[in-house]
């Protein structure tokens, strides 16, 4: 049999097609279905109304992340509507026999953080969740994508999904990432180049030296933001880093089963000569620490540059979009990014709330103080991360500097819980969306890496983390009154 | 699902690109556990000020467009969050079709499952419709059988949609029902899955 070289995506796809016919989309088997409280109640209701059951409850796992408060008294949820939604998930999990990692179970957390952490996310799998950032799990070489509530119901009832085969796109990043440039900057740099619909209809595979050198955490950050370029999913081929991350995790295979799994995982990477529908090449050396200036993740510039002038936009539609974004963000073209003051700093979300992110932020914060003008918070991605971070003493570093140290959840990433921005408050956030009102009506979000967010918290304004001398406590933290006035004048 | 065959209605122009689902239905309205009740919160932050007073300049608040059932928008409509609350809100507000140059994938899937038709037309055609709708409200006909968008004055543009989605929409088919007919295929596939794949039954 002659074997056509296949991509990682094609191998996973082919291995999961249950049935195929010319007239209908492929029916794809789903290995793992993740569920959270916001996008699932209507799906369970649909099942109940039709008298259907969950076909494979043991391949379904639920947690509570979007609505949960992040204060220590989080067990008592004040918002009655959020409380009803959480109650509904508990009832549904119980009624349909689904494992729920509830608040306080020791395993609760942001759904895209706990999947990998528990070893549920494994190479070669198909994973879905009623949440667009399901793309995160692609870091393990799993085909993982977000679905809507009707599709959630479909997967619950049939453990499969009707899908049209997407196209493939290779994003190759060769070279070594410069110091101070992170996986988050890689993601922002790519979206800045290809746009928020640059990968629509495609599954993106990331390859090249700079991607191979990323930790699993870094790969998750990169794949997480793939949806922000419009892609169906992002993928990184599994390798030794993937296997050693998974070894020994709660739901990872063990003993002989582990060996069988690894042997199969090794066959997954894209074959030499396999073809992609599109290829994008980027040099890692050209990437810098980025800060978004507008209301879409593609509105992004290096921290060393200035707020762009809409008059230089490529088209009339883009000019209007940019002008509108600047008005919303309260920014003036030409303002150097590192003079823009921040009011809030949020370190957290499924993009950047893992132990490695917290360590990186803590290295910048260590021995310094949060600027008096800033309210800053760290929200670990899961109960397990919070425990590990506390075991290492990271919470003390943050608390001593004046950060709030919170309980795990989505928190200020989308502000469905009490953590929100006030109108016009400006926030350096490690999350993934800077849409209008995302963190609270009128709130102004700038997306950055954890290191850049930490540095902004100390300095009181955006600052190039590369010029932030880690050996000199508070080197860039003192903003004198005159400078403070300039900072405030820089923005309207 | 409500079938879609042919619909004639007033077109309303919303000339912005990358309209994300956070704008279509802001998060504070996602806490409901029902499928209904979202229509009044459609584009909430654009339609109302912080006290809930309608903003007269926003197009959906203008009386001449109040009965509109076809939305004309810029490219990459529905990007961002996968919330199906977005098509629910649009449909419950009274929209039957959205016309834009391109749509985000998840939104498009979600819309089709709710009898809301995403119609992708060439950028130039969308632009022409947008300018006309901005001048004065006018009626458009979206015909899923003929795959065309037309107006009384002779405007006509063809669109494309995948055949299966069209078939389901025309007939209002429930795709869970369709998939359940393939039960034997699913069972056969399951029988061949490796046993080491994660399963939540074993308590660990
Ligand atoms: S952290 Fe933000 S992006 Fe991630 S799942 Fe939660 S709300 Fe969505």
Image (cartoon, grey):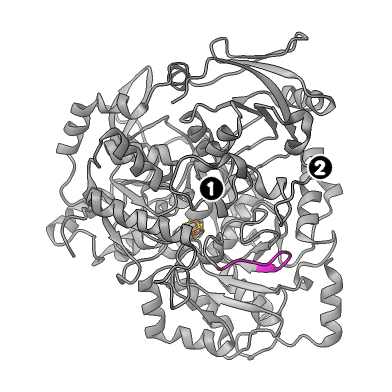
Give the residue pinned by disc 2. B57
Question: Residue at image x 64%, y 78%?
Answer: A375
Relative to A19, is A199 above or below?
Answer: below
- Report the chain holding disc 1: B
The span picked out in magenta is A419-427
Relative to A247, is B185 above or below?
Answer: above
Ligand 1 has an atom within 8 Å of the beta carbon of the residue at disc 1: yes
For mark 2, give the secondary structure.
loop
Which is more toward the observer, A243 or B8? B8
Q: Residue A244 carries which label?
A: none
Q: In which quarter of the image is the N terminus of chain A?
A: top left
Q: Where is residue B68 in the image (x, y as percent from the top left)?
A: 69, 27
Question: Residue at image x 52%, y 32%?
Answer: B111
Give the residue pinned by disc 1. B81
Left or right, B69 with respect to B163, comes to right
Q: In which quarter of the image is the C terminus of chain A?
A: bottom right
Tell me, yes or no, if residue A29 can be seen here. Answer: no
Question: Residue at image x 64%, y 57%?
Answer: A434
Q: Where is residue A312 in the image (x, y as percent from the top left)?
A: 84, 48
Q: How far apart are marks 2 and 1 (CA)?
A: 27 Å
Q: Magenta stretch containing residue A425, yes or no?
A: yes
Q: Position of residue B174 (x, y in %)?
A: 37, 26
Ligand 1 has an atom within 8 Å of the beta carbon of the residue at disc 2: no
Mark positioned earlier in the residue sequence (2 or 1): 2
Which is more toward the observer, A212 or A126? A126
For mark 1, give the secondary structure.
loop
Tell me, yes or no, if residue A185 can be seen here. Answer: yes
């Amino acid at each position: 049999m002659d074997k056509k070289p296949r991509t990682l995506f094609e191998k996973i796809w082919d291995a999961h097609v249950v049935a195929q016919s010319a007239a209908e989309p492929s029916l794809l088997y789903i290995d793992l279905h993740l569920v959270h409280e916001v996008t699932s109640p209507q799906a369970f209701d649909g099942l109940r109304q039709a008298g259907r059951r969950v076909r494979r409850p043991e391949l379904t796992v639920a947690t509570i992340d979007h609505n949960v408060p992040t204060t220590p008294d989080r067990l008592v949820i004040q918002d009655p509507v959020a409380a009803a939604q959480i109650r509904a998930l508990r009832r549904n999990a119980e009624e349909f026999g689904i494992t729920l990692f509830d608040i306080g179970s020791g395993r609760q957390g942001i759904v895209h953080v706990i999947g990998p952490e528990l070893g549920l996310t494994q190479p070669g799998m198909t994973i879905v969740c009623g949440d667009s950032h399901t793309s995160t799990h692609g870091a393990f070489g799993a085909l993982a994508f977000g679905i809507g509530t009707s599709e959630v119901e479909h997967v619950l009832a049939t453990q499969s999904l009707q899908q049209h085969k997407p196209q493939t796109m290779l994003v190759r990043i060769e070279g070594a990432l410069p110091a101070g440039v992170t996986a988050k900057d890689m993601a922002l740099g790519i979206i800045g180049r290809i746009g928020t619909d640059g990968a629509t209809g495609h599954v993106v595979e990331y390859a090249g030296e700079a991607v191979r050198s990323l930790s699993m955490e870094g790969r998750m950050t990169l794949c997480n933001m793939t949806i922000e370029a419009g892609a169906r999913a992002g993928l990184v081929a599994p390798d030794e880093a993937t296997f050693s991350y998974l070894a020994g995790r709660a739901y990872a295979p063990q003993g002989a089963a582990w060996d069988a799994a690894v042997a199969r995982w090794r066959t997954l990477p894209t074959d030499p000569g396999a073809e992609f529908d599109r290829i994008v090449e980027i040099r890692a050396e050209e990437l810098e620490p980025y800060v978004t200036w507008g209301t879409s993740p593609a509105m992004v510039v290096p921290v060393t540059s200035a707020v762009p002038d809409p008059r230089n936009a490529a088209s009339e539609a883009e000019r209007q979009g940019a002008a509108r974004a600047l008005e919303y963000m309260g920014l003036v073209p030409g303002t150097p990014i590192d003079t823009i003051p921040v009011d809030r700093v949020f370190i957290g979300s499924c993009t950047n709330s893992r132990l490695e992110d917290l360590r990186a932020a803590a290295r910048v914060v260590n021995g310094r103080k949060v600027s008096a003008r800033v309210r800053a918070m760290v929200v670990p991605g899961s109960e397990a991360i919070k425990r590990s971070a506390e075991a290492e003493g990271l919470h003390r570093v943050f608390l001593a500097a004046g950060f709030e140290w919170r309980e795990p959840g989505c928190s200020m990433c989308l502000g469905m819980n009490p953590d929100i921005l006030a109108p016009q408050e400006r926030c350096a956030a490690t999350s993934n969306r800077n849409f209008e009102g995302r963190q609270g009506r009128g709130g102004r979000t700038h997306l950055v890496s954890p290191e850049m967010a930490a540095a902004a918290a100390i300095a009181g304004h955006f600052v190039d983390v590369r010029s932030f001398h880690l050996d000199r406590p508070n080197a860039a933290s003192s903003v004198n009154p005159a400078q403070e006035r300039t900072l405030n004048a820089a923005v309207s | 699902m409500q079938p879609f065959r042919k619909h004639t209605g007033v077109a309303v122009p919303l000339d912005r690109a990358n309209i994300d689902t956070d704008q279509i239905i802001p998060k504070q309205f996602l806490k409901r556990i029902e499928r209904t009740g979202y229509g009044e919160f459609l584009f909430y932050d654009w339609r109302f000020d912080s006290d809930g007073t309608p903003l007269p300049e926003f197009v959906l608040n203008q009386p001449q467009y109040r009965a509109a059932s076809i939305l004309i928008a810029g490219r990459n409509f529905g990007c961002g969050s996968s919330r199906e609350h977005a098509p629910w809100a649009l449909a419950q507000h009274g929209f039957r079709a959205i016309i834009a140059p391109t749509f985000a994938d998840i939104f498009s899937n979600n819309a089709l499952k709710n009898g809301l038709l995403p119609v992708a037309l060439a950028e130039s055609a969308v632009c022409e419709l947008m300018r006309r709708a901005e001048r004065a409200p006018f009626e458009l006909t979206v015909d899923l059988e003929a795959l065309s968008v037309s107006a009384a004055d002779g405007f006509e543009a063809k669109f494309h949609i995948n055949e299966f989605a069209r078939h389901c929409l025309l007939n209002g088919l429930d795709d869970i029902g369709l998939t359940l007919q393939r039960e034997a295929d699913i069972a056969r596939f399951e029988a061949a899955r490796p046993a080491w794949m994660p399963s939540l039954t074993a308590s660990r």
